Amino acid sequence: MGLDTLSNSLKDAMKKLAGKTVIDRAAVDELVRDLQRALLSSDVNVKLVMELSKQIKARSLDENLPKGINAREHVLRIVYQELVNLVGKEAEFSLKPQKILMAGLQGSGKTTTTGKLCRYFQRKGLKVGAIGADNFRPGAYAQLETLCKKINVPSYGDPKEKDAVKIVKDGLAALKDVDVVIVDTAGRHALEDDLIDEITEVNAYLKPDHRWLVIDAALGQAARDQAKRFHEAIGIDGVIVTKMDGTAKGGGAMSAVAETQSGIVFIGNGETIDDLERFDPNGFISRLLGMGDLKALVEKAEESINAEDVDVNAMLRGKFTLNDMYKQLEAVQKMGPLKQVLSMLPMGNLNVPSDALDGTADKMKKFRIIMDSMTPQELDEPALINTSRMMRVAKGSGSSVEEVRDLIKYYKMMQKTLKGFRGNRMAMGKMMKQMQKGGMGPMGPM
C-alpha cells in the first residue's frame, strides 16, 4: 500500500477544490479538513498537521493574489509549498571521494541500504567499497558481502573480530584505492547504551564526511526519538527512510525526521539493489499530488538507458515505429517497476490500481514476445501488418490473433500520444511555474 492512500486522498482534496466555482473561506476550510484527514491517517504528527493547516488558511485568505494566476491556482500553489515544507529539507552531499557512516536500529534495513548506496555511487562513476563493522548480528557481514559481490564492489569484514574500530581501521587499509567508503555499523534492539558507545568510538576514529541514519518507515512518529538520540551521539547530517513502498506510516516517519531538522537524503522504495532514490522534497510532493517528477524520471533514465536505446527526438518529430516501441519497452524495463516509472509522470488525478499496473507489466512482456516474431520490415512499417501477417505472427509467438491486434492498437495509441506530447509538456511547465514561484520544480530550474 505504501503512500498510495495518502496520495489518493491528497489528489481527491485538490480535485474537489479545482471543481469549486468560488474560492472563499468555506472552500478553504473544507480543503484544510480534507488535508487534515489525509495526513493524520498517514500518521503525520498532529502538531505539524495543525501548523500546516494554520499556514494554509492564513496564506490563502490573507496573501495578495500574484499576477498571472487565479484564486484557485493560488490556493493550490500554497498547499504544494506548505506540503514541501512539511517533509523537510533535502540533505546535501556531493559526488566526490568521501567516507559515510551508517547508523540505525536492528531491522531498519541498514545493511541492505549500504549495498544499495554502493550501487548508487557505482552508477555515478565512483569507485566504492563497503566495510562491515556489524559483528553483533550473526551473518551481517555475509549479507553485505553477498550484496557487494552482485555488483562487483569490494567489501571488507572480519566476523571473528569484536572490536568495531579495529575492523574499520583494517577495512580502510584494504580499501585504500576506492573513492567512497561506506561503513555499516551494528544495530541493536532499542537505543542501548553500548550501541551508542560503540558508534561514537567508530565515528571518532573514522571521522566520516557524512553520518546517515537509516529509519524504517513503519515506525512512523517513533522515528523522532531515534533521530534525536543518534544525532546527540554522532551528529546525524542525513536520514534514509527505508521500506516506503510497504507502509502507510511513511508520512509519520518523514515528518518526525523533518521536526528534528535532519534532512532526508534517500528513500528506499523496493527490494532490489537499485531501489534507492535520491530524496527531493519538491519532486516527492509533486508525485503525491499526481503532477509527476520529471526531474527524477530523467535522472533514472540517464542511469538506466543508453543514448542509442531510444531516439526521443525522432519520436517527437513523429517517426515512431514498432521498432521504436520495442526499444521503448526494453528501456522502461531497465528503469524498474512500471508503477514507479508511472508515478514520475504527470497524471493529474488519475488513480491507477496496483493490480491494473501488474497486468500492464505482464502485457508489455507479451508484446515484446510478439514483436520478436515480426520481420524487420514489419517492425519498421507497421501498416504492412494485415490479417494474414497477424496469423503468422500469432503462431510464431504462441499468442492469439486478438493479442496481436491489441499490440497494434497499443502502438497506435502510443503514436498518437507522442504527437501531443510537446503541447502537454509545455502545459505542465506552465502549471509548475504557477505552483512554485521562482524555485526549483520537479523538472529543474524554471
Image (cartoon, rainbow, N blue to C red):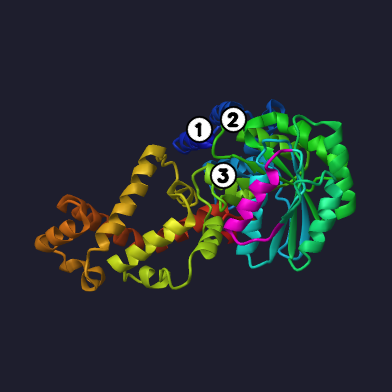
Can residue 63 be seen at all in this image of the molecule? no
Left or right: residue 335 compared with residue 330: right
Residues marked 2 and 1 touching at CB (< 8 Å): yes
Residue 423 coordinates in the image, percent (x, y): 40, 61
Residue at the image position 70 percent from the left and 31 percent from the top:
48
Residue 216 coordinates in the image, percent (x, y): 65, 36
Give the foreground label among 3 and 1.
Answer: 3
Residue type of the residue flagged with mark 1: Thr
Residue type of the residue flagged with mark 3: Asn
Residues marked 2 and 3 touching at CB (< 8 Å): no
Report helix, strand or loop for mark 2: loop
Left or right: residue 178 compared with residue 412: right
- Alpha-carbon distance for marks 2 and 1? 8 Å
Question: Dot 1 corresponds to which residue?
Answer: 5
Seen from the viewer's position, the closer of residues 306 and 165 is 165
Instruction: Say few, some or many: other residues with alpha carbon within 10 Å of mark 2 (under 14 / 14 to 19 / 20 or more).
Output: many
Furthest-front residue in view?
160
Left or right: residue 416 compared with residue 274: left
- Alpha-carbon distance for marks 3 and 1? 15 Å
Report helix, strand or loop for mark 1: helix
Question: Dot 2 corresponds to which residue?
Answer: 42
| Above or below: residue 151 compared with residue 9 | below
Q: Which residues are magenta?
A: 137-155
Residue 366 coordinates in the image, percent (x, y): 29, 53
Left or right: residue 228 compared with residue 8: right
Asked if residue 384 is among those painted magenta in the image, a careful observer would answer no
Can residue 273 be seen at all in this image of the molecule? yes
Among the two numbered marks 2 and 1 on one chain, the one whose residue lies closer to the N terminus: 1
Residues marked 3 and 1 touching at CB (< 8 Å): no
Question: Dot 3 corresponds to which residue?
Answer: 269
Residue at the image position 65 percent from the left and 61 percent from the top:
153
- Alpha-carbon distance for marks 2 and 3? 16 Å
